[in-house]
Amino acid sequence: MVPIAVEEEMVFGVDADATDKQNMMRNEEEVNRAIERHADTIRRLCMIHLKNHADTEDIFQTVFLKYVLSSVSFENEEHERAWFIRVTINACKDLLKNFFHSHTVSLDEIMEQPAELSADHREVLEAVLSLPPKYREVVYLHYFEDYTAPQISRILGKNTNTIYTLLTRSRKMLREKLGGDEYE
């Protein structure tokens, strides 16, 4: 006896795998809700990592395409948010590792983006963006997304004490770059 899916493929030319994939895709309402909730976070994370608006938009689309095609069911909103952050960071790292990708965008180009920043905020942003990636990620998640060290450790897959150390070191670096305790 021939399974129904194989039989449909033979008779109607229907690809059973494609039909299964369509059934696994998320509906438009779910996708729109996710975009509404996570778009800003994903764009900010991408800008922190990539320092380039065009690459940010590419990764933004990639992340949501992965979401649409993913069959992952989330335990709660926090689990979903952590999934988006992890997928975004991984996609950024993949792009930066790409042989053809040139990531020589200066900080001046980022500062020319339309968002108007006060001089103090611009100086702080410049200092954060100049941190090495492992510090930049932790600072962003802690100060901009309000995650605690244990939450960051779960998202990044690192030890909680490592996160505390990275936060301490990054604060010290920022203090040196910004000139004292004025920004704390």
Image (cartoon, rainbow, N blue to C red):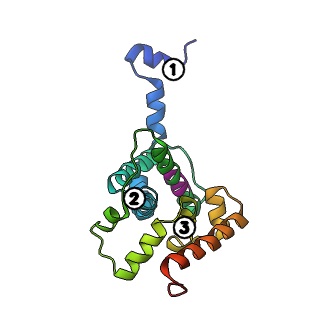
Q: Which badge, 3 or 1, comes first in the chain's sequence?
A: 1
| The label number, if any, that marks residue 4 in the structure image | 1
Q: Which residue is mark 3?
A: 141
Which is more toward the observer, 15 or 35? 35
- Which of the two labelled residues, at mark 2 and mark 3, occupies the earlier sequence position? 2
Residue count near mark 1 (Cα–Cα under 10 Å), binned few <14, some 14–19, many ≥20: few
The residues colored magenta run 83-88
Question: Marks 2/1: CA distance?
Answer: 51 Å
Overall secondary structure of the magenta stretch? helix
Give the residue displayed 62% in from the left and 64% down from the top.
Answer: 152
Q: Position of residue 110 (x, y in %)?
A: 34, 64
Amino acid type at mark 1: Ile
Q: Which residue is mark 2?
A: 51
Tell me the amino acid under the disc marked 3: Leu
Identify which residue is drawn at 45% across, 41% down. Answer: 98
- Quadrant of residue 172 within the rendered picture: bottom right
Find numbered disc 2 in the image and state the secondary structure of the residue it sits on. loop
The image quadrant that residue 86 belongs to is: bottom right
Residue 143 x %, y %: 53, 74
Gap in angstroms between the C-alphas marked 3 and 1 = 49 Å
